[in-house]
Amino acid sequence: MKQRKQLRVLCSIICGILLVAGCFSIPAYACTTAYYGWTWDDSIDMSELTVQVYSSDFNETVTTNALFAWNMITPIYVRHVNYSSSITSGNIEDINVHEQDFTGTTIGQTRLYRKNFLGIYVETSISSTNTDICQARIYLDPSLLDSSDAQRSRTVTHEMGHAFGMMHPVLNNCETMCIMQQGGSGFGTNTIQQHDENNMIAKWGAYE
C-alpha cells in the first residue's frame, strides 16, 4: 500500500513537471511560415539550378561554398556554379551574382525576375504572391571583400535564402536565431539553423 502511495505521488510530480514544461515550451514549427508566396517557374529544373558569378572578385571558395550551403535540405539545390568577369554578357543562368555599390548599411540584395508575354525578363517584387519567377539576381557590395570570411559567407548564404523564397522571420513576428534573420536586429547567425531548414521544408518539401 505504501509503495502504491509513493508511486501515485511520483506520478503526480512527473505530470506536474510535464504540464509546467508544456506551458513554457516553444513548438519547433511555431515560426515556420517565414517564406514568400512566389515559386520558381515550372520550366525551371529546381533540382539542378545553375549560378553564374559575374564578378571575378567573388570567384573564391568562400562564395562557392556559400552558394551550395542550402543543398540537400529540399528538392531545390545548386548543381553548377559558373564564373565570368563580364557583366555585359547577359543574365543567362537561373541565379546570377553581381557586384554593386550600395549605400547605407546594405551589403547584399536579391531581386527576382519573371518573363512577360514577350519573353523578356522583368523585375518583380520579392514579396509577390502567386508569381512564377524565372531568375534571381544577387547583388553584393564590394566592401564584403574586405570583411571576414564568416561575414562574406553569411551574406551570400542569406541572399541565396531569399532566392529560394525565404523572408526575414522578423517580418512574420518571429525573432528566432537563424541566418535569415536580419543582421541588424542582432538575431542573425553565421550558419543555417534548424529554423531556416524548417522554413525551407515547409515551402518546398523535404529532400529525399
Image (cartoon, grey):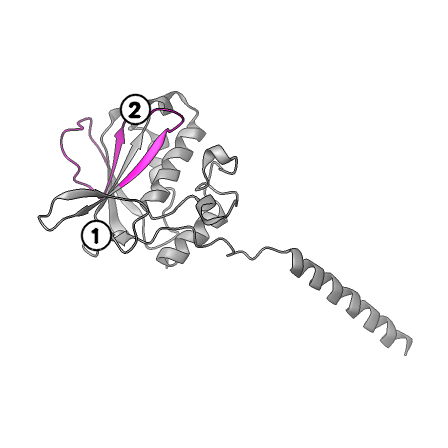
Judge whether residue 104 is colored magenta: yes
Amino acid on which the number 1 mark rests in the picture: Ile
Q: Which mark is residue 134?
A: none
Circle 2 residues within 10 Å: few <14, some 14–19, many ≥20: few
Judge whether residue 137 is colored magenta: no
To which residue does mark 2 refer? Answer: 101
In the figure, 184 relative to 166: above or below? above
Q: Is residue 117 left or right of residue 84?
A: left
Mark positioned earlier in the residue sequence (1 or 2): 1
Badge 1 marks a residue whose secondary structure is loop
In the figure, 132 relative to 120: above or below? below
Badge 2 marks a residue whose secondary structure is loop
> Split into 4 quadrants, where in the image is the C terminus?
bottom left
In the figure, 81 relative to 173: above or below? above
Q: Which mark is residue 44?
A: 1
Query: 123 or 90: nearer the eye?
Result: 123
Q: Magenta span covers which residues?
A: 82-111
